Image (cartoon, helix red, strand yellow):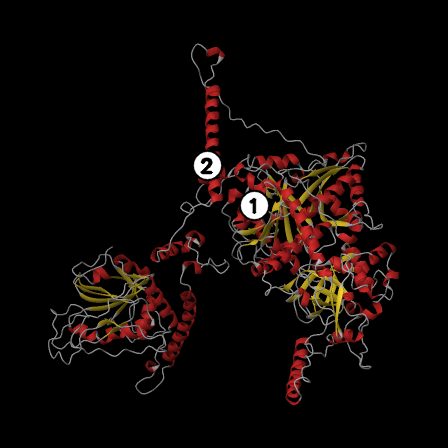
Amino acid sequence: MAPLKAGDSFPPDVKFSYVPWTKENGEITACGLPQPYDASKEWANKKVVLFSVPGAFTPSCSISHLPGYIKLLNDFKANGVDIVAVIAYNDPFVMSAWGKANNIKGDDILFLSDTDTAFSKSIGWTLGERTARYALIIDHGTVTYAEKEPAKGVTTQPPATRGATKENFTSPSQIEHQNNPQNAPQSNINTLPPPPRASSSMGPKPAHTTASIQAKKRTIPSSDSADRKRARTYDARKLAVQSSDAALSKTGELDVSAFVAAREFEVRALEAGIRNSKSALASRAFQKVPRSLRRRTASHNVKRVPSRLRARARREMIEDNTPKVTARRRKPTQLLRLRLETARRLQNLNSRSKARRAAKNASTLDLVPLPEDEGKGSQKRPTHDVNIAPRVPKIKKNRLSHPEKPQSKFKKRQRCKTWLPTHVFHAKRAHMTSPKDPLWRFVVPLSPTEKSYRPTHRASGARGAVAWDMSYISTIGLEGLEVCLERLFTALGVVGEEAWGNKGKKWKAGTRGLEVWLFETGGEEGMGDGKRPIAPVTLIWCSEKTDEDVEMADAGAKAKKPKRRMFLRVHPSAFLQVWEEVLKAAKVQHPQVMVEDLRFDIGSIEITGPGATEALLGALKPIPKSDGKEWPKGSPESTWISLAGLTNAASLPQNALLAFNISDPRLRHPPRTIKLPTSEASSSDLAVLLSSWEPDSTQLRPDLFSRPSRLTASRLLPSQKAINRRKSLASPGEYPSPKPTDPRIPVLILASRPKSLSSGGNSQGTYTVMLPWKCVVPVWYYIMYYPMSSGGNPRFGGLLEKQQLSFECSEPWFPGDYPGTNAGWAWEMRERDIRRKEWERKPKQKRIAYDSIDLGGPKKGEIGLGWACDWERLVQSEPLEKDEGLAKTGEPATAVVEGDQTEIKMKKQQKPLERENKKRKREKQNKSASTSATTYTFTRPAPPPLHIHHLPPSAAFTILNAKSRPKPSASLPTPFQFHLTHPALATVKLTLINRGTPTPRARIYRLPATNLSLRNEWLSLLSPSARTPSAQHQSKKQKQAQIFQASSKLLPTDLSADPQPAAHLPMPGEEDLIGFVTTGNYNLTAGKGTGVASVLVGRVVGCDASGLDELDSLSESRSQVSGKGAKGIKVGMSREKLARVCIVRSAGERVGRLGVWEVV
């Protein structure tokens, strides 16, 4: 609607809302009920002055605008005005309180609420989402004055009304006084310049007393975006206050309720100002995105902001005349132009070939003359709608499988890698691996694009859930006689009570999973009788119990022994090595065990957190029985439904299995929150269920082990169009009814928990849902959009979030925390190359100078490569101790002697770099050759050099626990003696004692074994009476600085030039280096700095290659003799714990922290 002007009729059906003033609600703390106010009807036969303000209680409106109208009220009445009303966009309660705050009683001034600024928008006078400043005079339904005021600040001047008549009264700003014009000030509504920004108060402006209204010299600016921003910032930074004078009566008595109401108003104004000031700083739409999203700095694409902000962003771009560049109008680059032309040419060829094939089929099939009707003409051949099942492909025994051929438009992007089933979901929401550098032949999501470190920690432990698409985990299927399978895994190192004893009965029955390490079948040269560990795997047997087992109970004993099936799940980094070892062991069995590659047949989803059970219960709905009855109590389906209300998967039995068939989750989209039980009876029933766990005896054979069942579920999976068609035919608010032809998706749920729970941890358990590869997407989308009862939706995680949660549980992550394995060494080489490139990209003045780091000894420089966990340097350091001039490449070093210091400038700082450059060139050539090939081939990762191998947790625990014994090497069994003289690595958990945070690649030292004085200084930090190292060194440093300053004034300059003592303790020598930190950070769960590290077992135990035993000097518990005398140092720590004390120093730093390691 066009703006109102003089002579227009007042619009009909104009309605406001207000709270009428009564004696009962006359106080500002009292509240009445809002009532509608039909302005068109009430003002039809009256003369009305209506003015509008942007908002109640704002400084300009409360101090400069409204008080003038209050002063003019009697003059308006004298000029025949029946009603004076003010409107704003605020609700009726705020408008009523504003009138009471200004002591307006009765109907002197009506404080009306323009709800949703409906009236102001209808006449086009708004200030953003607020009402603008304007004034109207309505005389019996006709508008006689209508002017819009600028948004700079308004003041109202009192008119002299003596002698004024109704004829010359046209508007508050045009009152002309007839009597005594020299003494009477003229009109009222005038715009004034805004108050200065430096002013801290907004007092009333002095009244203008000119005899007549004169036009301003400066033109009124238009209300553009700059004015709106200025007004919004001005209002947000000014707080409204109330005077305390109203709380005092005429006799000086204090009205407590009015005084408290005034103070309450000021407090609320302060809170509102704090809130408004935050939004006032964000002037653009792209700055108002949610906190979890990253800032879209200077984004000029409205599609990159949330949908609720796109209209505002589009308006801002129009007002600012921001140039918009879309994909269609952007000038393509040379490479993009060639791609577009190639795509257009291929599309034309494809369309022509399709047209030719369609014409050929129409001519040969549609019009074929039938034999009996040749004389009567041609008829169409009859068609049939029978679905013919496709041919089931043959099982590829003992052969690697290949992924399914992708669509033609995605084929080029998957030339040397494979997309996960949920790749399209993650590609828009996560950082993915580089196209030229995939991980393990998969495009793996690394981390969400939004801020996710702390939200992931909260969702996994406090409220919510975190899910991962773990379809890149490799699955191997095995089938053979039970005896042959036992011999196969025994040859691979699966031994012990948990596998083949009483503890392994449930595992062999198919109701539990087993997590074990696999070893190579043959010993490596230089490894002795020891076997190199490969990787941790999960083994799952197929339960052989079926519905016909009761009928077959009386079968003859001469029946042929049935073959059994099982799954082996392993990390993809070690898949090829495990595949070769399993295949080698399977071929020597009689009868031979069949090995099948199921990597692209079975996908998986992992989910953890308090809401994981609830989200899975909504997504995995068991298919009801054919007769319509409920599942019997104790069955896997009934047990799964009864888990509603469970908040931690760790409450289930360790590695418990549940297998059943589910319906398509897309038929129940959008998801609805399931009803969780809250009664005490349901909690007790859940506790009984978890303690008894009846599925151990009722679990039937899972359909996921059946290849026809997997193929049938994938083939019958309907398209999304078919799902939408069925949903459109359903009643509103109801899901489509199930059909007999709906797919039966087999799922296998594995509930696991971290091993830290056995030592008193409270970490969350994890569900692993295994299902057919093509059925992962429907389940994934349902989980991601499921509305949890605690609020929000489950989060998704990437590879970094997987490492984060493993680190917070103090669990090592494979392969990164196992550098002694082939897969772990390949990961270390990859990370080393990434960190080296980051270091080289930095300018020389900003990157760490590893060669010049002072560690407090005679040597300078970092030990080994600063950007790597230099295991080669650690293993080869013994020859360096005997001949310091011998570098890693065998080149002698050159030493320069300067006074008492010997600076060794070894060529090892240059030769290893040259060697690494050559190595990188070879790797780059090999990588380019491998990526250029179109065949799906694998290369087995190379083993670590120098016969470095990793110890499994059981062996590491046995060896390192013997450290506290008098003679550890003599007390160890014979098979473990080999690991003490050869480079064996063990994974440990690291916890700092006082303060500090370990970082990746940090160096770990044992307590000095040869320098007893330095060792005593480090042990003194463990004394309970000792202060924190920082405070101790700080106070000592301050005292020394004061002494140094005082002496410098008395002594000559050359005598006072001695350097100040070091503020931190010197670090031990390289001979005391025992390992490196592979993962380290501040642990949000533990509330301190922790890490996961690997240590050289021979160095820790104290037996190096020379057979030295330093255990006694490392593990003295109660007192140590210092170098100055017999001063005892009480450590307050047991012998076993003191033997595990170490010193941790980050790479590139010279400050060490005390910590304690523990085998995991």
| Quadrant of residue 136 within the rendered picture | bottom left
Circle 1: element type: loop
Q: Which of 328 and 1109 is in front in this view?
A: 328
Which residue shows up at 35% across the image and 86% down it? Answer: 253
Disc 2 residue type (three-letter): Arg
- Image x and y of residue 170, in percent: 15, 68
Residue bearing the label numbered 1: 422
Q: Nearer the viewer, residue 694 or 436?
A: 436
Disc 1 residue type (three-letter): Thr
| 277 sits to left or right of 135 | right
Q: Which of 1045 and 1096 is in front in this view?
A: 1045
Q: Residues within 10 Å of mark 1 (few under 14, many from 20)?
A: some
In this rendering, the label closer to the viewer, 1 or 2: 2
Q: Which mark is residue 344?
A: 2
Which residue shows up at 50% across the image and 58% down it? Answer: 294
Quarter of the picture holding the N terminus: bottom left
- Image x and y of residue 158, in percent: 21, 76
